[in-house]
Image (spheres, rainbow, N blue to C red):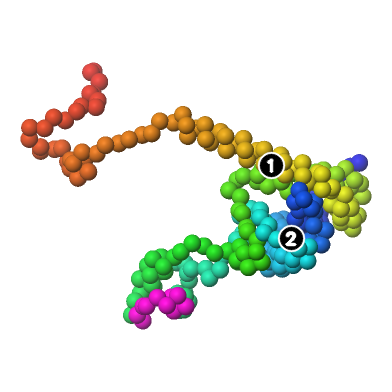
Amino acid sequence: MKVPIGKGSRLIICHVGSAETGFLNECKLVFRSKGKKNTDYHCDMNAIVFTKWFQNFLSVLEQRDIKNSVIVMDNASYHSVVRDKPPTTSTRKSDIQDWLMKKNIPYTCCQTRAELLELVQAAKGIKEFELDIMAANAGHTVVRLPPYHCQYNPIEMVWAQVKRQVAERNTTFKVKDLEDITNQVIDEVTQDAWAACVRHAEQLQDEDLKKEIARDAIMEPIIIQLTESDSENEDTDGREDEEVEILATPLQQ
């Protein structure tokens, strides 16, 4: 069939699963994008939407009596909202002062904005993400993938299967039919399919780990010994009775 020109309407999908459960059906979220055709999905899937979905996900784990789970996610912006985010160079001076006051960090009203930011920089600690804290309070642990390593997340392979089957069944190119097909295909993903994707992701991690260990084993340590004169970074010009090694000589014309 001739495919219509242009992207047309799109669907936003958010879901979660594991080798032991397959997809958690209670957590399926499929809705139509309200953004313009030339915008990406971030106008629809944002921190507010995802946090609400994540709260429902944690409640489903509690209802199923699933404890001590490891929740794998990437570093998308809506996954990584920082709790009590430190001020930046674009923050107003009054807001910087409020942040310092909450942290019980002394400052004076006569200090400039730049000086206040120096106090902020000195007080910065480890980032605490809102979702990580929510998960920890419910007895679960969030593990974030290294940047540009989406192959370690088995749901990426599940999504590839889902999108391929949706594309094969999408013959009318109508958003209502597309929505029905998407829900149907997602519901057909079995626990065995999930388990296979998890095993493949774990295999990739193991292979990369072995390569990294082998690389560390064959690399010889580089040791640089500094003499007293090297550490002082002195200029050799003008030194008396000292040999200077000539590293290069000019070419003869």
| The C terminus - image quarter | top left
* Amino acid type for the residue under numbered disc 1: Ala
Prevalent SS, magenta region: loop
Residue at the left extreme, as displayed? 240
Question: In the image, which residues are magenta?
Answer: 100-109
Residue 223 seen from this side:
yes
> According to the image, label 2 marks what residue?
66
Residue 58 at x, y = what percent? Answer: 72, 65
Q: Which secondary structure lies at badge 1?
A: helix
Front position in the image: 247 or 61: 61
Residue 192 falls in image quadrant: top right
Which residue is painted at 44% across and 31% down in the image?
219
> According to the image, label 1 marks what residue?
201
Residue 82 - label = none
* Amino acid type for the residue under numbered disc 2: Ile
Which residue is painted at 45% across and 75% down in the image?
103
Q: Which secondary structure lies at badge 2?
A: loop
Residue 116 at x, y = what percent? Answer: 38, 72
